[in-house]
Amino acid sequence: GPAPQRYPQDLSLLIDVPLQIVVGRTETAIIEVRPLPVSPPLAGTPRDATVANRPVAVARLSSSLATVRPDGDEGQPLVANDAVRFTWSLVASEPGGGEVTVLVRLRFYPIAGGVPIERVLLARTMAMTAVSVLGMSAPVARAVGAGGLAAGVGLMLTFGKQAIAWLRRA
């Protein structure tokens, strides 16, 4: 038969959300919903009646500081004994402070049809900061990096032949 739905007390959450990110760098946030082993299910308990639903984990990550992809709700069916993993990329364009909000819900869809029931597992807003590399904004850091690369190539072309000749004499 179908796997029984999970109750919030049957689940653990792993949350790996960076609270400090570097401007212009893509950072990764991960939330994992892990079922705890439930054995054996007791007959006649509310859990027994939940076989009539399809459980779906729904997660959303949003930020006032960074662009978050994918944007909006992400849903994945919960299967007994399998972890569900949500992954987002975050990119900040300017240094400063802001917030990141994590929302994880369980949605139970009745197999016979009808209105789904939703339970919030986690709703939390945390402070997040974006820092620039060496105090530079992202465009300046890129320009300095490109300038350093051009200078390195120029020095290699200028002194490379001399260095090779010197190494051959040694």
Image: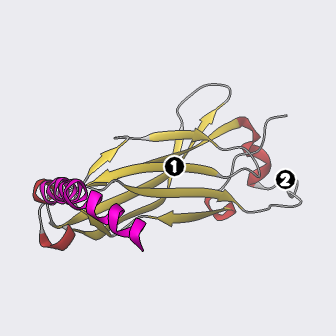
Residue designated by label 2? 44
Q: Residue at x 73, y 63 (%)?
A: 36
User: Is residue 26 highlighted in magenta?
Assistant: no
Label 2 SS = loop
Residue 162 quadrant: bottom left
Q: Residue at x 37, y 65 (%)?
A: 124
Residue 25 quadrant: bottom left
Q: Residue at x 51, y 57 (%)?
A: 31
Compared to residue 79, the image places residue 36 above or below, namely below
Q: Image check: 14 left or right of 28? A: right
Total numbered labels placed on residues in the image:
2
Magenta segment boundaries in residue numbering: 141-170
Residue designated by label 1? 86
Q: Is residue 65 visible?
A: no
Compared to residue 2, the image places residue 143 above or below, namely below
Q: Image check: 143 left or right of 106? A: left
**Residue type for callout 2:** Gly
Q: Nearer the viewer, residue 106 or 26?
A: 26
| Alpha carbon distance from label 2 to label 1 | 34 Å
Quadrant in which the N terminus is drawn:
top right
Q: Nearer the viewer, residue 152 or 139?
A: 152
Q: Residue at x 34, y 63 (%)?
A: 165
**Residue type for callout 1:** Phe
